[in-house]
């Protein structure tokens, strides 16, 4: 079954956003939380508490993930705690006075309605805040770890051309270059992200790297142009993930390597909590959310991690079988789902058999490598 969250700005049906409300796996608690917070007035003061629910729920669920206790009842308790703390805080007069004297913010948001523009600007504004260490080193280390732990050998690196399909701020485009690839090309629709990517690559003196503005669903490249086509957590945010896979394989050389990461279904408490936050945050100004989280002293890469899926318009979740079927349909072979990851990846927790891994993380990330016939 495909779980496709439509543009959350255009729906009031909670079941379209939060699967666990319909399944009632946690009883009525998720619905109670989302309904209460959504019924609050739409103003800066109440949006502030909507935003605070993000770090609250992330912190609490991460504590659940580290615990060896049964997680389902703990998650229900956390949701009730969020509900009660929000109820108590919004009626506290001291908090109201403090807020009104501390925050000034325009409600205007310069995001276009078209999904690719809206998504591009969302990620562009997130990526441009990364410091150089996070930008250059973190992505390289993550990519290298995921390749190594899954036994993926890249031969003749100096002869290969890589396409980063949906490069955002270009972190992984640069990472491939740092691993020794001859040339890397990043394609994305975000002007903000591409400008930041070009500036950072220039600053670091990185050569043989290009960034091109285009849709990942209609890329301006000839068939069989690239040795490796890397798509890492992008197509699930587009209007047509199937078209994105078709494009990926179209521009890949015969015998070339593909990498595809799409959000998993089932996803356990990890994705259930994010869907709850998506419902809560669906009408909140993105710039305001970033500013509030930074004002709390939350590091930029952590802000990105929290707001990544919470505030993007489309968040399609897929089973492994659906992804494999679409890859095969478009000429992929030797398809392998990766069972290892970086230390914080959910598949790595499943690999290490952490207690209650299924309840916490579902099946883990849907990362695949494959080749083109």
Image: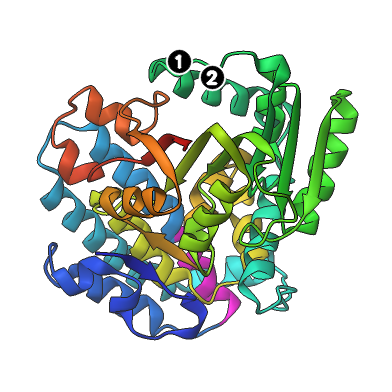
In percent of width and height, residue 141 lies at: 57, 20
In percent of width and height, residue 17 lies at: 35, 72
Q: Which residue corresponds to mark 1?
A: 148
Residue 234 seen by the camera: yes
As drawn, is 244 to the left or to the right of 210? Answer: left
Asked whether the beta carbons under mark 2 and mark 1 sit within 8 Å of each other, the answer is yes
Q: Indicate yes or no whether the magenta region holds residue 255.
A: no
Main secondary structure of the magenta stretch: helix
Mark 2 falls on what kind of element? Answer: helix
Please state which of residues 33 and 350 is positioned toward the viewer in this rendering: 350
Q: Residue at x 28, y 58 (%)?
A: 272
Which quarter of the picture shows residue 157? top right
- Magenta region: which residues? 43-52
Instruction: Determine crowd level at label 2: few under 14, some 14-19, many 20+ residues with C-alpha closer than 10 A.
Output: some
As drawn, is 228 to the left or to the right of 323? Answer: right
Q: Which residue corresponds to mark 2?
A: 144
In percent of width and height, residue 67 lies at: 20, 33
């Amino acid at each position: 079954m495909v779980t496709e969250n439509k543009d959350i700005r255009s729906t009031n049906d909670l079941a379209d956003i939060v699967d666990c409300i319909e399944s009632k796996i946690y009883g009525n608690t998720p619905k109670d939380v989302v309904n209460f917070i959504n019924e609050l007035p739409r103003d800066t003061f109440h949006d502030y508490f909507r935003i605070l629910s993000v770090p609250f729920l992330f912190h609490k669920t991460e504590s659940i993930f580290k615990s060896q206790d049964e997680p389902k009842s703990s998650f229900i308790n956390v949701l009730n705690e969020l509900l009660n703390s929000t109820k108590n805080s919004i009626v506290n007069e001291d908090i109201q006075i403090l807020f009104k004297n501390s925050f000034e913010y325009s409600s205007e948001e310069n995001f276009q309605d078209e999904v690719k523009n809206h998504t591009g600007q969302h990620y562009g504004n997130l990526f441009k805040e990364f410091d150089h260490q996070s930008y250059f080193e973190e992505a390289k280390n993550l990519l290298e770890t995921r390749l190594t732990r899954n036994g993926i050998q890249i031969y003749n690196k100096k002869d290969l051309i890589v396409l980063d399909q949906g490069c955002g701020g270009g972190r992984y485009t640069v990472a491939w270059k740092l691993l020794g690839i001859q040339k890397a090309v990043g394609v994305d629709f975000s002007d903000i992200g591409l400008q930041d990517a070009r500036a950072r690559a220039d600053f670091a003196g990185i050569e043989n790297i290009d960034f091109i503005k285009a849709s990942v669903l209609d890329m301006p490249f000839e068939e069989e142009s690239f040795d490796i086509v890397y798509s890492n957590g992008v197509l699930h945010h587009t209007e047509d993930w199937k078209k994105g896979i078709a494009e990926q394989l179209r521009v890949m050389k015969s015998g070339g390597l593909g990498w595809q990461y799409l959000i998993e279904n089932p996803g356990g408490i990890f994705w259930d909590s994010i869907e709850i936050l998506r419902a809560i945050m669906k009408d909140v100004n993105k710039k305001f959310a970033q500013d509030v989280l930074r004002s709390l002293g939350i590091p930029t890469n952590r802000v990105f991690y929290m707001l990544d899926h919470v505030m993007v318009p489309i968040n399609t979740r897929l089973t492994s079988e659906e992804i494999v079927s679409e890859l095969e349909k478009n000429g992929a072979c030797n398809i392998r789902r990766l069972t290892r990851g970086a230390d914080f990846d959910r598949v790595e927790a499943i690999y290490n058999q952490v207690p209650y891994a299924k309840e916490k993380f579902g099946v883990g990330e849907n990362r695949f490598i494959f080749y083109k016939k």
